[in-house]
Amino acid sequence: MADTEEFPQTRTRAIPVTIIAGFLGAGKTTLLNRILTADHDRRLAVLVNDFGDVNIDAQILDTAGVDGLIDLPNGCVCCTLARDLVRVVQDVIAIDDPPEHIILEASGVSSPADIEAILDVPALASQVQVEAIITLVDSENILRLARAVMFADKQVAAADILLVNKIDLVNEEELAAVLAWISQVAPNARVIRTQFAQVPLDLLLDSAWPARAGHPEPGESELGDGHDLQTWTFRADRPLVRDCLMAALSSLPATVYRVKGILYLEHDPTRRYVLQMIGERTALTADREWAESEPGTQIVFIGQQGTLRTTDLENSLGECVNR
Amino acid sequence: MSWTTEPLTAEERAEFKTLFEKRLRKVEAKTADVFSFKKVEQPPYIVNSSLYWVFGLDPDTFPDAYFDDPAVMTTFQERTYYDQVKEIDDDFVPYLVPWFGTIVAASAFGCEIKYHPKQDPAADPRYYPVQKPEDIKGLHVPDPQKDGLMPKVLDYLRYMRENSFLPVGITDFQGPLTTANQLMGYDKLIYLMFDQPKLMHALMDVVTEALIVWIKAQKEVIGEPLDWCISDQQVYTGKHAGIWFSDDDAVLMSPDTYKEFVVPYNSRILQAFGGGCVHYCGNATHHAESFQNMEGLRALNIYNLYDIPSVVELQKKLAGQVAIFACDFTPVEYGDYFDELLSSLSYEGLVIDSQYSPVVGLLKGGKYNAINRDLKSGRKAVYEDLKQRLEKR
């Protein structure tokens, strides 16, 4: 958890970027195809290494311009990374209807931390912000890969969330060995076991809330599609003390994968703040004035089913409410 | 943009030839010192621009017919070399190169080639000639006179030799590991090493043999002795190395995997040409032991990506055995970079090469940034800066 001094109060939200990393064959393309075809109600830009990797209709592909950009039927845009990454991102965010979120497919041999550093160049730093690095791991092959190459551990260590994929192809003993290796390389990683890269898009995208108007009800709920995940919502009408809140968030267990919320903070009560926390990566950004709307805090926690200690969370967050 | 591809006039050509011959004598002597690891007051140093490949150039200055007409390629290279040699008295020895990207050998094995406008030719990753391990058994050593881009390169070599006084070097040479990677993709290649090591060795064997045949064919056309090579990517080597090749994928490999599947094949090529140089970008310090045991390795050409400590470490481990060419694209803040480089590396067995680009600048931390700086005045300023720093020491 970063120190609270790292959260500038006047910062406005940049376009969030999610980097999808992992060696070739780990399931990145499967995940990208799910994102591209899902009904997420978000205008996404998906930057891929090659159009040939994703399921895009040939007729749509024919519309690709010289900049490698194509419009998809669901309002998203897709672009190849055949050119310089900085220029591709600049082109994507400069289109008439810019994306709300950028998904970037890292090449199979690249270091996602290096990509994040590239996106931090002055030409882009104020316009995009890496929200998460999601690394997929092929549980059947990762241990062999780690012995053969130098980058496998870097991809894993850089992850905010690790999708240990293809678990249907390994037995319990093999999976335990993979998890043991991960615990050495990335002891604080948020690890989710998956088949066919099936993971709720709520984990990957800031979908529907809080950027959208809907307000979740406080309390617990389960994510659909049979995923072994649970959500819980904290709500407070009184302002929160920022440093207290950050301290509480820093002690969350590794089974909490994502936290997102709209915050009503005591030190700046006229403005709402947006909280995004994926793994240990936290961003708190100043948003618009509350104006006519009723100030209040709502924070959604997404974690492994059965591990969200909601009473403890309620108590620790409750202590941060300025009464 | 001030670059032009007007052919050299007779007067310019005569002046260029005089400058070239004088420079060659100077650099030959310095190079002998490098490979004998002699203690010197100044190492040879190069400040030049990307003179034959597209990456690092302002694409708008690149001739459209560069990859279609040997006269255009030759004229462009002669002109840009002349412009540079006139204004910068560094240790670069100009030579012509038939440049078709990094995929000439792979094309002869069946890789399809993509020509993107104003970019270097590249292999199309969707059409690997080795789709499954069994395909390796069907690979054969290509015929340089018939297969892929090889005949075209030979034609360009002939043209260059017949139409210029400048020496002509072999086209870009990717080593066995990178070539094998180009044939089947990195994922399949890595898993092949584990699942079917005999087939992996069979692949490396046929690729290595093909590369040796290919280099011999080129040397025959340009009249270059097997154990003599004009340059390792713009660093003059002459009689001290018969060959150079790129081994960029080395940095990704673990030490044991590299030792088992790559070192024997690199050694075979180096020995076939009386020793030579290996190039890579990044940090391959973890292969120091392999480099020590790579028979025929005379020098490492390292684009260190501003990771100078890694070069220092490697230089210490290979001292007196393998020369170091410390290369990089010229950083945006090049003064700090040169200070660190000159204060931390030994000058024994060292060459410094700073590739100045008007459109690409290296940042501290090893990232490239798109920039816009003047080619000629910027290149000259970098040269003067490095020269002065060396003279002060």
Image (spheres, coloured by chain):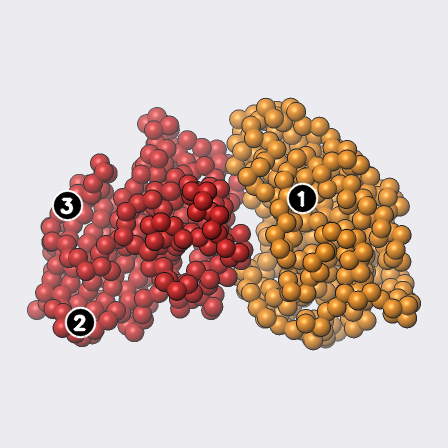
How many residues crowd around disc 1 within 10 Å: few (fewer than 14), some, or many (20 or more)? many
On the rendered structure, is B169 left or right of A235?
right
Foreground pick, B125 / A233: B125
| Amino acid found under the numbered disc labelled 3 | Ser
Q: Secondary structure at mark 2?
A: loop
- Residue A89 numbered mark, or none: none
Tags 1 and 2 touching, CB below 8 Å: no
The subunit carrying tag 3 is A
- Residue B103 numbered mark, or none: 1
Q: Secondary structure at mark 3?
A: strand
Q: CA distance from mark 3 to mark 1?
A: 55 Å
Query: In x, y percent, where is residue B212?
Result: 77, 36
Foreground pick, A72 / B154: A72
**Residue at numbered disc 3:** A221
Residue shown at 85% from the left, 54% from the top: B167
Chain A colour in the picture: red
| Amino acid found under the numbered disc labelled 2 | Trp
Residue A222 appearing in the image: yes
Chain B colour in the picture: orange
| Amino acid found under the numbered disc labelled 1 | Ile
Q: Secondary structure at mark 1?
A: loop
